[in-house]
Image: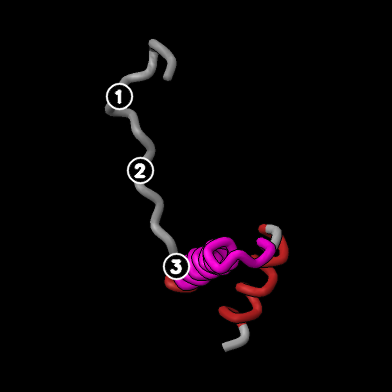
């Protein structure tokens, strides 16, 4: 933060449309599924998938329900 800026001059909080909120929720869900798959593979001693591969699988799960 620059010395000339005041702390009270913060940007107003952004409001999202319902469609944007739904999209954000799905993205969070995809990321969570990807992390879970990597964690489970490591826990079971299986070869860990790459982030890209696990994201691809997770997005298919979430978006093709």
Indicate the position of residue 31 as horizontal and vertical percent values: 54, 63
Q: Nearer the viewer, mark 3 or mark 2?
A: 3
Quadrant in which residue 2 is drawn: top left
Question: Which residue does the numbered mark 1 point to in the structure image?
Answer: 7
User: Which residue corresponds to mark 2?
Assistant: 12
At x 53%, y 70%, the residue is 33
Q: CA distance from mark 3 to mark 1?
A: 28 Å
Query: To which quarter of the image does residue 62 belong?
Result: bottom right
Residue furthest to the front in view is: 45
> Can the viewer see residue 20?
no
> Residue pushed farthest bottom?
65
Q: Which residues are magenta?
A: 22-48
Residue under numbered circle 3: 21
Q: Is residue 10 above or below residue 45?
A: above
Q: Which mark is residue 23?
A: none
Distance in Å between CA atoms under marks 2 and 1? 13 Å
N-terminal-most mark, 3 or 2: 2
Q: Position of residue 63 (x, y in %)?
A: 60, 80
Along the viewing direction, whichever of 39 and 33 lies nearer the viewer: 39
Classify residue 45 by image quadrant.
bottom right
Label located before the other in sequence (2 or 1):
1
Residue at (30, 24) in percent of width and height: 7
Report the number of discs: 3
């Amino acid at each position: 933060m620059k010395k000339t800026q005041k702390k009270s001059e913060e940007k107003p909080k952004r409001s999202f449309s319902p469609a944007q909120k739904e999209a954000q929720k799905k993205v969070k869900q995809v990321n969570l599924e990807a992390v879970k798959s990597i964690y489970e593979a490591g826990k079971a001693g299986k070869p860990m998938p790459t982030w890209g591969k696990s994201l691809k699988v997770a997005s298919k799960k979430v978006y093709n329900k």
